[in-house]
Amino acid sequence: MNKVAHYLQEHVVGEVMTSSDARKYFSTDNSIFNLTPSVIVYPKNENDVRKTARFVWQLAERGRLIPITARGSGTDLTGAALGSGILLVFPAHLNHVQFFDQKEGVVTVEAGVNFGKLQQLLLTYDRFLPPAPASLEYSTVGGAVANNSSSMRSLKYGDMRTYIKSLRVVLANGEVIETGRLNKKELNRKLGLATFEGEIYRSVDTLLEENRELIGKSILNVTRNVAGYDIADIKQPNGSFDLTPLFAGSQSTLGLTTEITLDTEPIAEEPVLITAYLDNIKDVESVVVELKGLEDSPSAVELVDGNLLSLVSSINGNYLKDVIAPPYPKFIILIEFNGGKLKKLIKHTTKLLTKYTDRIVIEDDEEKQQTIWKLRESSALLSGHNQGMLNPLPLIDDAIVPVNKLGSLLSAIYAQFSKEHLQVAIWGHAGDGNLHLQPYLNLGQVGDRQKAFRMLDEYSRTIRELGGSTTAQYNDGRLRGPYVDKIYPDDVYKLFQKIKKIFDPYNTLNPGVKINVSLDEVKPLVRNEYSLDHIYDHLPLS
Ligand SMILES: Cc1cc2nc3c(=O)[nH]c(=O)nc-3n(C[C@H](O)[C@H](O)[C@H](O)COP(=O)(O)OP(=O)(O)OC[C@H]3O[C@@H](n4cnc5c(N)ncnc54)[C@H](O)[C@@H]3O)c2cc1C
């Protein structure tokens, strides 16, 4: 055991591990990258997190830099749950629901709580947390906060940021702070603190005040965006101030979250699902744009293309048997309403859809809706299914564009894949202009590795030209970190760098992720093989 591990073992209550097995296990997440940590710590309580951060800070003051990375369940698709130094694995012990206020619907949890378990608990009280990632059974609430996760129903309900009331965060130097919206008086009190917390409040406030006009330029013209840092929601026009939006989505590059207090929603009315089959890209875009004009937002507007359905049928011939028979349409749009003036909404939606198609199904029976949703859920079959040595890779994925550019995005994707002689299947949150796809490549082949980065480059350029963001849900990490400076103006990117410096002056908090990331440093980290095995293997210690 190395000296760092030895010191930590003597000072924290939780376990410290350096065995090659454990380090290998934590050397992958769900991304295409591989990075082996030197020490793994399972914090037993917040004090363990604090002590570890404090120790790393003290070493940094003496010139020895050891990265520190928080880890939930490691389902991250961008390499952000990996680190070469100390990995703090939260779900092992910090996995308790602390408090649930039934009347207010407010819940407080430790960061390592499994998202699926929390959702189950809330459902028993007829409530839910809408931005649940599709990976909720395997992932933690802390991970969802750090990635600012969202779901298909975020179209109506918003992302994780919308639901966070406050966070307890361990700062780079080991101080613990509690975030939440502060009025002017409370902010002044923070500004006067002679601690690192006070320094952070002063520096962030000054930065925002000196760059008021620039802040607006950090808001891209899309409905959801997790690229860079959310600097626009910290200070409101009334002077109120909250660091929460900054931590949410920061991928442990600004602090380590130990506790989260969240709002929840009551279960909605019985939903209605409208399915429409469409034959061309232009109609998909027109339908989505017109849906935006409805009086009440649908709770979801999802898309699958015919290629996905063909691919799913080739993987499992029975999966779609009770839902749809070939020949498959080019596109299917699934529109769900779960509130508002339902009758009127259905009438308006049907009227607008009939301009584009006569193949429309309206379903109010929830059991039958579940069957129809299999069309969309079928995309999950792809992730775990290889074609020989070819794996579906989380590589060029998760872009979001203004909805009136959805058609251009679809066309660009088909053209790019055709040029590379690769098959493509597309699904996603059409209502937000956010699409998902996973090219089949063999990372063991040099040619495919080169192709991967060539495609990533071209895809990111397309997104920039369409005025979108390279990431709506899955965040930047190591994968898209090198592109953050390309989708924002230079002076906005410089603000992000200053934010990072304020919170993490020694660059020990998850370095190489999100900000100040170069392609040269991430390319050597690409794995030779790709699998999702660790998701299924992962068993928290308690
Ligand atoms: C099949 C599949 C489907 C997915 N579907 C969705 C989806 O629908 N929507 C979506 O948004 N995402 C989705 N994801 C991405 C990912 O699962 C989510 O972002 C998830 O919330 C991550 O949680 P985790 O516990 O696995 O975090 P990890 O992967 O362990 O970590 C994710 C990030 O959070 C940081 N982090 C973790 N814990 C803390 C903490 N306590 N303090 C500070 N930082 C911390 C890590 O350092 C890392 O940067 C999907 C992934 C897969 C594999």
Image: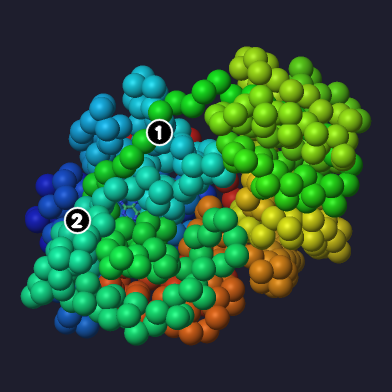
Residue in the image at 59% along x and 39% along y: 296
* Residue 111 at x, y percent in the picture: 29, 45
Rounded to the nearest whole Å, what is the CA distance between mark 1 and mark 2?
23 Å
Q: Secondary structure at mark 1?
A: strand
* Residue 121 at x, y percent in the picture: 34, 25
Q: Quadrant of residue 385?
A: top right
Asked if one can make out residue 503 in the rendered structure from this viewpoint, the answer is yes
Q: Secondary structure at mark 2?
A: strand
Callout 1 amino acid = Glu
As drawn, 412 above or below 129: below
Please state if 159 lies on the left or on the right of 294 as rendered: left
* Residue 200 at x, y percent in the picture: 22, 73
* Residue 387 at x, y percent in the picture: 74, 43
As drawn, 94 above or below 105: below
As drawn, 322 above or below 213: above
> What label does residue 178 carry, if any?
2
> What label does residue 265 carry, if any?
1
Label 2 environment density (alpha carbons within 10 Å; few <14, some 14–19, many ≥20): some
As drawn, 201 above or below 5: below
Q: Quadrant of residue 318?
A: top right
Callout 2 amino acid = Glu
